[in-house]
Amino acid sequence: MKQEDIENRLSEVPLFKELSKEELAPIIKIAQTRFYKHKMYVFMQDDPLDRVFFIHSGKIKIYKTDLSGKEQIISVLEPGEMFPHAGFFRKGNYPAHAEVMEDANLIVIPIDKFEEILITYPELCIKLFKVLGEKIIDLQGRLEAQVLHNTYEQIVLLLIRLCKTNAEKAGDLYKLSTPFTNRELANMIGTTRETVSRTINHLKKKQYLLQAEDGNFMIDRNALQQELFL
């Protein structure tokens, strides 16, 4: 990847968006690029946390596993996103696995060098805290969904959330940019593939959920939101 490509990608990342070329230069200087093929691990849960990644192209699945090996998908990240969001200014380990869903070009910055830049530019720390705050709000919303809603409602809430994180607007609908399987959707909220399959079929019959030619879901977000308040 050319230095110009790194500069263009990092300048689009929310964390760096308002930096001038001069301010971005020291970040580009310490950045490296790496290519990861489909199914490769960028890092594994409990590996020493020593690098931060920015996605130039491809998709990365972030998930945790318990002692029995059961998978809990946290998120699917797309170009322009940064990961992990935790672990700055302390020694620690990666809190989850990062697996490549689509061949990916990643921009890699060593954590210790990145921390030095955050100290040099305090405004970056403020932006980082805002990003972390949004992640915390998202996690609180997921916890509320598990406590306050039944499984059907949790699946509806998941589809609504994916409209924001992994979809593009297509007229009145939202088209998912990732072809999630029922198993993957189930692993996002801790339910079974069969339960998700039944719910998906029900939503298709009500035409709240359609399937595009490429297999990706087309979601009527407004209809799903109204479904929660029936």
Image (cartoon, helix red, strand yellow):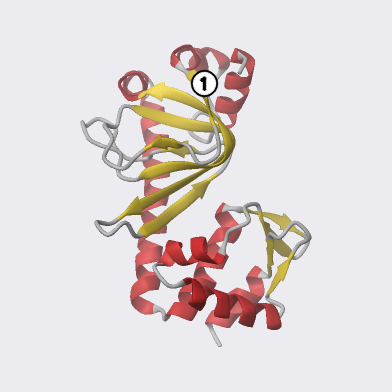
Residue under numbered circle 1: 33
Residue 165 lies, with reference to residue 123, above or below; the image says: below
Q: Is residue 206 visible?
A: no
Q: Residue furthest left?
A: 91
Q: Position of residue 141 (x, y in %)?
A: 40, 64
Q: In the figure, is residue 215 to the left or right of 55?
A: right
Q: Position of residue 122 (x, y in %)?
A: 36, 26
For the residue labelled by badge 1, is the local secondary structure a helix, a strand or a loop? strand
Q: Is residue 137 visible?
A: yes
State the residue in front, 53 or 186: 186
State the residue in front, 140 or 200: 200
Residue 84 lies, with reference to residue 29, above or below; the image says: below
Residue 216 lies, with reference to residue 8, above or below; the image says: below
Name the image quarter holding the N terminus: top right
Give the total number of marks visible in the rendering: 1
Q: Residue furthest bottom?
A: 230
Q: Position of residue 218 (x, y in %)?
A: 70, 64
Identify the residue at horizontal 36%, vertical 70% (top origin).
Answer: 144
Q: Image quarter for residue 71?
A: bottom left
Identify the residue at horizontal 21%, vertical 32% (top origin).
Answer: 90
Name the image quarter holding the C terminus: bottom right
Q: Image quarter for residue 180?
A: bottom right
Q: Position of residue 210 (x, y in %)?
A: 72, 70
Crowd band around label 1 with a 10 angstrom C-alpha radius: few (<14), some (14–19), many (20+): some
Identify the residue at horizontal 51%, vertical 49% (top origin).
Answer: 76
Q: In the figure, is residue 83 to the left or right of 209?
A: left
Identify the residue at horizontal 44%, vertical 62% (top origin).
Answer: 188
At label 1, which amino acid type do we have?
Thr
